[in-house]
Image: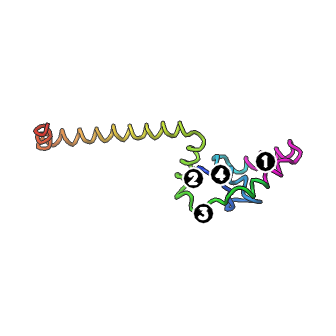
Amino acid sequence: MNSPRTTLYRDKHNAKLMGVCSGIADYTGVNVFWVRLAAVAAMFMTSGSVILAYFIAGFILNKKPPHLYRDESEQKYWQSVRQSPKRTAREIRSSFRDIDRRLAAVETHYVSSNPRLNAEIERLR
């Protein structure tokens, strides 16, 4: 089962017609202008068969839930997850390693500057 944040929706909030292009733009993180421009260009290149696909997608896709993202940064995060899940996982692991390194540095500083705590830790070993 997919997370609601990794599903393609129609975005009626930013829609011009049915919200398919704005939903694709939200899903991919591409500016909606470029998605609409590509749809118009594809319409001329395919003799209008894209129009049929657009309306089919408009009827099949669900509307985007109103409070899918808390803020802009969460929206950008989920767009990057959809674009490259492996890269996102690497970035998260890297962030956790950095947090762990900084926490170890704080712990070392605190223990070294507090002789009583340092002695207590040594006694426990």
Q: Where is residue 31 in the image (x, y as percent from the top left)?
A: 68, 48
How far apart, in angstroms, are the residues tagged by discs 1 and 2? 24 Å
Instruction: Name the residue located 57 percent from the left edge and 58 percent from the top edge.
Output: 68
Residue identified by numbered label 4: 8
Eyeballing the image, is 61 above or below 94? below
Q: What residue type is labelled 1?
A: Ala
Q: Which amino acid does label 4 sit on?
A: Leu
Residue identified by numbered label 1: 39
Q: Which amino acid does label 3 sit on?
A: Pro
**Contact check, label 1 and label 2, Cβ < 8 Å:** no
Element type where label 3 sits in the image: loop
Tell me where the magenta segment starts and ends, as one range.
34-54
Q: Nearer the viewer, mark 4 or mark 1?
A: 4
Instruction: Name the residue located 64 percent from the left edge and 59 percent from the top edge.
Output: 64
Residue 105 falls in which quadrant of the image? top left
Element type where label 1 sits in the image: helix
Please rate how many residues cluster around mark 2, counting C-alpha atoms within 10 Å: few if below 14, some from 14 to 19, many from 20. Answer: some
Q: Was residue 50 drawn as part of the magenta stretch in this picture?
A: yes
How far apart, in angstroms, are the residues tagged by discs 4 and 1? 17 Å
Q: Which of marks 3 and 4 is in front?
A: 4
How far apart, in angstroms, are the residues tagged by discs 3 and 2? 12 Å
Colour scheme in the image?
rainbow
**Contact check, label 3 and label 4, Cβ < 8 Å:** no
Element type where label 4 sits in the image: loop
Please rate how many residues cluster around mark 4, counting C-alpha atoms within 10 Å: few if below 14, some from 14 to 19, many from 20. Answer: some
Q: How many labels does the image show?
A: 4
Residue identified by numbered label 3: 66
Please rate how many residues cluster around mark 3, counting C-alpha atoms within 10 Å: few if below 14, some from 14 to 19, many from 20. Answer: few
